[in-house]
Structure formats: C-alpha cells, structure tokens
Image (spheres, coloured by chain):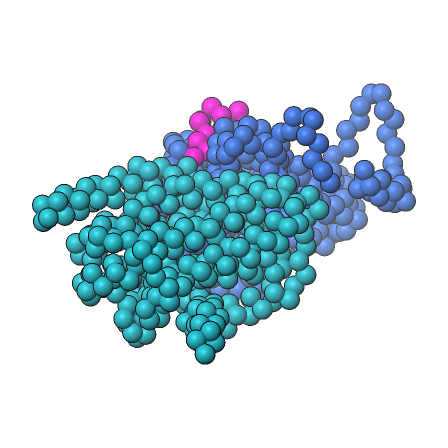
Chain colours: A cyan, B blue
Amino acid sequence: MNTIQDLFTLMFFPGGLFVLALGMSYEWVDRKLMARVQNRVGPRWFQPYADIAKLLVKEEVIPADSNRLLFIGLPILALAGALTAALYVPLAGFDPLYSFKGDLIVALYLLSLLTVCTGLAGANTTDRFSLVGATRTLTQLFSYEAPFLLAMLGPAVVARSWQINEIIADADGQWLLIVQPVGFVVALIGLLGKLEIAPFNAPEAETEIVAGALTEYSGRGLALFRLGRHVELIVGLTMVAAFYMGGVSGLPLFVLKTLLLLLILVGIQSLVARLRIDQTVGLWWRWGVLLVLAQWLVLVIWEGVQA
Amino acid sequence: MKLDTTVPQRFVVPIGPQHPALKEPGHFEFTVDGEQVTGASVRLGYAHRGIEKATEGRNWVQNLYLLERICGICSHVHATAYCLGVERLAGVTAPPRAQAIRLLVAELERIHSHLLWLGVAAHEAGFDTLFMYSWRDRETVMDILEALTGNRVNYSANLLGGVKFDLTPELTDKIYKGLELLEERTHQYVDVVTSDATLLQRTRGVGATTREQAEELGLVGPTARASGVERDIRTEAPYAAYPDFPVQVVTATAGDLEARFVVRLQELFEAYRLIRAVLEKLPPGDLQARMPRKIKPAETVSRVEAPRGELFYFIKSNGTDQPERIKVRTPTLCNLASVCVLAIGSQLADVPMILAGVDPCFSCNDRMVTVYSGDTAHTQWTWKQLRQYGIDYYRR
C-alpha cells in the first residue's frame, strides 16, 4: 500500500506529471503576460502542451558526427535532474516529498544538471551554432551559479540549517526579502540566468546563433529539454517564494506567490535588451557576487552578535 | 562528415543565406576566435531577379511597375527615381502639385522604413518589446499610405509625368492625426534609445565608424550621416518638390550604433515637419503632364534619397518605346562593405547588430556582373550547361 502511495506521489501528484503540467501552465502564463506587455495577443492556454506534444511525435534527426548515446541520453538526464530537484521543494504548498540534511545543496545542483546537460548537448555536435551556444551556456553557468547559490544560502545561514523544510520552518512565515533584500534580488535575477531568459538569453540568442546549444535538437530531445526548463521554472520560483516570501503553505498561497514572482520576471524580461555574454559575466562577478558576499558578511556578523 | 583534425581549422560562423538574423538571403562568413571576430566575408546574389535585363523588353510605362517592385520597403523612391529620369529624357516636367505629392509619399515611406528598421534593430539586440511597439506604431503610417494610394507596400503613386491621386480634406485630416500620434511616440523612442541602460550597452561604441572611414568606404544615407558626413541628395541635388521644401540634414558625430538610432529617429521628426509643410502649402494645379510614347536616343542619371541613402538610376533611351539600358544602384550596396570592415575585432554578438545598423536590403542590391578578362574567352552558357554546373557544384 505504501509503495503504491509512494509511486503515486512520485509519478502523478505532487511530483511527476503534476510538475510537468504546472510547468507548462506557468510557461503559458509567462508567454501570455509577455505578449500582453508587448501589445500582442499571445498564445491560448494549451499552446505549451501542444508544442510539447508536437515535438514528442516529431522525427528526431540525430547528426551523423555526434555521439548517439549522449545525444539521446542528455535530454533524459536533464529532465530527470529537474524532476528530482522538484521532490525536495515544497511543491504546490505541500511539504517536500523527501527531505534530509543538506538537501538544499542537492536540489540546487540537480537544477544545474539541466544547464550542464544543455552545454554538453551543444558540445556533442559539430554544428557551429551549437558549439558557440554550448560555450556561452557553460560560461553563463559559471557566472550566475555562485551568486545564485550564495543568495539561496542566505536564509540557510539565518536558519542554521541546509535542509529546505527547516529553513522554511525557521522563517516562520516572515518575509525574508525585507531583511535580506540583496539576496532576494540576486536570487530572482539568478533565476533569469538559470532559465536563460532576457537579459541573460545570450546562450540562445536567435539572431546570432539560431537556437544556441540546442540547434541540432528537433524532436523528442528538444521536448525533454523544454520540459526540463519548465520544471526548472517551477522549482526556482517555489524556492525563491518559499525562502524569501514567507513560505508557501497551501495551494492558494503557493499559486499567488509564485505567480507574483513570475510577474516580476516578465516585467524584467520585457524591459531589457539582451546582454552580451561578456557583459553577463561582468555583471555577475562585478556586482552579483560582491553584493551577496557583503550581505553574507552582515548576516554572519549579526548571527555572531546574537549568539 | 567527419572533421579533419590534421589541418588547423578556422572556426567560421556562417550567417545566412538562411539565418534568423537575416530577413532576406545573404551569406556572411565570420571567422571567430572565441567570441572575437577575426575575419569577415560577404557573398550576395541569392535574390537576383534579373530586373535590369527585364526592363529592356518592356515599354516605359510597364517598367514603372516593374521597377517599383525592386524593393518592398522603399518602392516609391524607385518609381520616383525612374519617373524623374524618364521625364528628363522626354523633356517633360511634372506639375508642381504632382511633385509635392511625390515628396509627401516619399517622406511617409521614409517614416515607415525607419520605424521598420527600429523594430528590426531592436530585435537584433534582443529588445523585443521595442520591436513590437515600433511595429505597432508603424501601422499608423501604413494605414495612411493605404488610405492615400490604396496599397500598403507598392503604392504605385507615380505615373510618368505626374502622380495618380489627389489629396482630399479627409485624407489631409487623417495624415495630421496620424502624425500627431507618431510624433509623440517618436519622442518616446528617442528617449528609450538614448537612455535605456541595457540597450545602450549593446549600441554605444559598437561598430563605431569615423568620418574618414565613412568617406573611404563610401557610405551613404543615415549610416553615413551618423558618422558626421553631411550627404543627402535631398539637399545636394534637390529633386521633385524638395527645392521648395528644403530639408534640414540630421547628422551625428559618434558613428556608432547609438548614433545611427538617433539619426534615423531624428529624421522622422524632419519627415513629420516636411509632410506638414507640404500639406499646408500644397500647390494647386494639374496632377499629370502629357508624356510621349517614344523617347529619342539620350541618356541620363537620376538620383534620389531613399530611406537607406542615395539611390542611383542610369537610364538610356534609343528612340523606341523601350529603354536601351537601365542601371540601378541601391544604397545597401554602398553600405554593405562597411559591415565586413567593422565586424573585424568586434564581438560575435555584435555582428548582427552591426549588420542591421546599415539597414541592409539584399534583394535590391543583387546584381550579375560579368568580368571580361584578357585571357579567358567570353562564353555564354546554355541552360543545360548551367544546370550541369549546379549539379556538379553541389556534388563536390
């Protein structure tokens, strides 16, 4: 009986299919809001579902000069990583399905797995757009990852725990973004970098390198990568909302807070032009890291004073 | 196909003939070292349509409609350049009212072309919101053009010896209303391109062309004016009604992409001013002068200022109702070489921006050139030989 229940939570709700469905719905919200901001009509609610369904049934062309195993395996690994990360965050307001000491680090690195897989997938082909895209993807990974991680660890330092549900319990419904505004901003902008959306969409800048690292992907592989991206969006939004916006207990609160965050993301996206990759790196290492480190210093000293 | 690893490879990023950055087919090869561009070459000819040759088999009136279709964006200036040239050959002058209406449509077309460019350039910079907004506002001027001429693209406003339509009070009102909206929006765009931090990071100092470079490379139009070269056919050799409605040439000195944005947007204000001036002082009179069917042998050069720069027509008549030769040189051809010069040393990410900065229009500048050299005999290929060449070329 327990096995069946475990399987259900893993495969259907709140893990597995539910995350995928939620991811696609949020993708639609993102696209629709973006379109409305830009004075366009935007897609109808089922468009992301239709896109994925279409890609899944499409023929997948595997380039002759790439490693077949990697070409097929990388998207699966990427989606699996993102879906596994989803198990450690309070999805839809429920407690995380699995929890152990240090699961924050595991969840964050499972999310990065998607980016690493994208980079490897690009480097796996000899397509020139893919190669440039892969270089950019990995360069970007190294620029936003450290500040993003540090920003996520801010609440952890205060809670003196690296376990996601303990951090949320410690905050006890307080909005940490008031006391750690820098961490919140860096986490939010780090999310933009993680999801490769404007202004950090240099790795897939269509006017320069077509579709970046994923240029050679056509059918199922592309669908899986995109699903992975959708799940990443959900997990990222959930984490930031849970840590910085006083937890996400209950479905209505979860939806409200994550959509609010998404609205902010759309606002940023629509107001900026694309940064060049060197500008992205400069921005993160010159500002992001320094600001977060400064906040860390304040937090550590404050903790020391209190102890 | 496996890469040959024994030979040192140059990493070439091809842009085109099919590429999302290009709205028309052209082929650019950029050799890159990481993100740095170290070499650039351009290959054109993917949209060659043989229009120049086709004009020789059509009469003067038919050619008007053919030549207007050289460019989908600046169709009116092509027709104007042709009409002015042919009228000069025939010794006919179009009435003042017709000349003023030609100017009016030309300036409306400039507005639509510059707004279109603003959107394309913003899209290349990844600033899609500006792209969508500028194209939305461009609809205003497209609606005006449609109301005036009945067409959104190939307006067909010109006739040999005049224009086809007259202005009514309702149309004048519509234009005034549209201009009011556009002027307000243009102020907003000038504000955005000169103050938006992320856009400035992509435009300020990028693709900077000095005045000397601009003159050396023979740049024309807004691209040259952004580098401080005061070159504008509307003031240097005024045509149509431009002698009566003088143009204030807009220039900038920086020569970078920001300057090109600013020059094109400031030219919009100039266009609004000119259109209002024409509407206020529209000369009365006829719309068309009588044209002869045949034109005695002569040749002439006709130059006009297209939205992208100087448009050059050479027209030769031979006493029949058909031209002997028509040669068209479009502004893109003059500007395109600068892309290859400016791209070297810049970031790969800036290349589409630099390319868009000259406002390229490929299909109008594709030509076929036969080079006669001393040692090879000039041969003409049959269709069969040409087909075989194509098969062999792609089999390699």
Height in image: B311 above or below B154?
above
- Give whichever of B17, A284 is nearer the camera: A284
In which quarter of the view is residue B333 placed? top right
Residue extending furthest bottom? A1
Residue B163 seen from this side? no
Residue B305 in magenta? no
- What residue lies at 82% left-to-right and 20% top-to-bottom? B374
Q: Quadrant of the N terminus of chain B?
A: top right
Task: Give the percent coordinates (x, y) of residue B29.
Answer: 62, 35
- Give whichever of A181, B173 is nearer the camera: A181
Q: How many numbered marks appear? A: 0
Residue B345 seen from this side? yes
Q: In this view, does A105 lie to the left or right of B220?
A: left
- What residue lies at 33% left-to-right and 48% top-to-bottom? A148
Q: In this view, does A243 lie to the left or right of B31?
A: left
Task: Give the percent coordinates (x, y) of residue A227.
Answer: 50, 62
- Give whichever of A32, B9 is nearer the camera: B9
Height in image: B84 above or below B42?
below
Residue extending furthest top? B375
- Give whichever of A190, B95 is nearer the camera: A190
- What residue lies at 20% left-to-right and 61% top-to-bottom? A171
Height in image: A71 above or below B342?
below
Task: Give the percent coordinates (x, y) of residue B318.
Answer: 77, 40
- Magenta stretch? B206-219
- What residue lies at 55% left-to-right and 70% top-to-bottom? A50
Task: Give the percent coordinates (x, y) of residue A77.
Answer: 53, 55
Q: In which quarter of the image is the C terminus of chain B?
A: top right
Q: In this view, does A225 lie to the left or right of B246?
A: right
